[in-house]
Amino acid sequence: RKEVEQDPGPFNVPEGATVAFNCTYSNSASQSFFWYRQDCRKEPKLLMSVYSSGNEDGRFTAQLNRASQYISLLIRDSKLSDSATYLCVVNIASGGFKTIFGAGTRLFVKA
Amino acid sequence: SQTIHQWPATLVQPVGSPLSLECTVEGTSNPNLYWYRQAAGRGLQLLFYSVGIGQISSEVPQNLSASRPQDRQFILSSKKLLLSDSGFYLCAWSATGTAGNTIYFGEGSWLTVV
């Protein structure tokens, strides 16, 4: 089983739609969590950290469920510019810290 | 503010040729440094990480090597490239000390081995 699993998609949604991405992690020693965005042929960039209480940044909402070992990202009112791959990232405490990247979920927002 | 740069941005190399990718970080001291590879349509694979000058940990055995000759310089090398070395190579850094720090990536280097 992969340490971090995401639905690869692609998700094809119209502009203005709400879309949700899910991510599960297998290691209970996971301590911090992030969502990154990667545009085609570009480097991944931090989108937002994920906090236990849930957090929101404009149209983006991230949630963490430690009991279920599950992270989500909700995008409201999708824009064409949201088209990208979204990577779930988990830091695991294991004699130091180890960062695990999910393979990503591809999103296409269409007019 | 901190910045990270890597070069070259793209390169096409024949099988068996050497490789050198360089990365530098500015605006921070003693960063953790990383080299990742992303094959087409696949996730990020950690190749090497370094917590200090001359300290390199390898995650995946292969024909690549890394070096950290200066605090904010990280180099990825190969003596003889294989076709399977093709991919998108990303240098990254994170702050030292606090666990679970955010990782920041350079612009990446596209390598095609022919």
Image (tube, grey):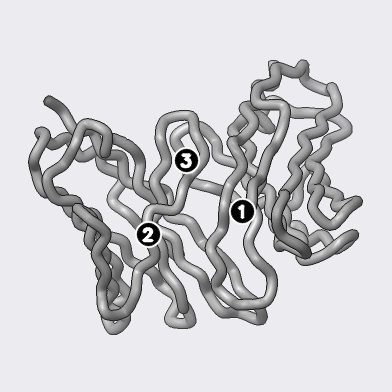
Q: Nearer the observer, disc 3 or disc 2?
A: 2
Disc 3/disc 1 C-alpha distance (Å): 31 Å
Residue reaching furthest to the front: B1
Query: Are dots 1 and 2 in contact, CB under 8 Å?
Result: no
Q: Which residue is mark 2?
A: A48
Quarter holding the N terminus of chain A?
Answer: bottom left
Q: Chain of mark 1?
A: B
Secondary structure under tag 3 reads loop
Chain for disc number 3: B
Q: Is residue A77 above or below residue A46?
A: above
Quadrant where the image shows the C terminus of chain A: top left
Looking at the image, which residue is at 44% across and 35% down? B41
Q: Residues within 10 Å of mark 1 (few under 14, many from 20)?
A: few
Comparing labels 1 and 2, the label whose residue is closer to the camera: 1
Q: Is residue B105 above or below residue A52?
A: above
**Of the residues shown, which amino acid type is indicated by label 1?**
Ser
Disc 1 to disc 2, how far (Cα)? 19 Å
- Disc sitting over residue B42 in the figure: 3
| Same subunit, tags 1 and 2 | no
- Dot 2 amino acid type: Met
Q: A86 and A103: which one is in front?
A: A86
Please identify the quarter of the rendering in which residue B50 is found: bottom right
Residue type highlighted by circle 3 = Arg
The circle on residue B1 is 1
State the residue at coordinates (20%, 56%): A74
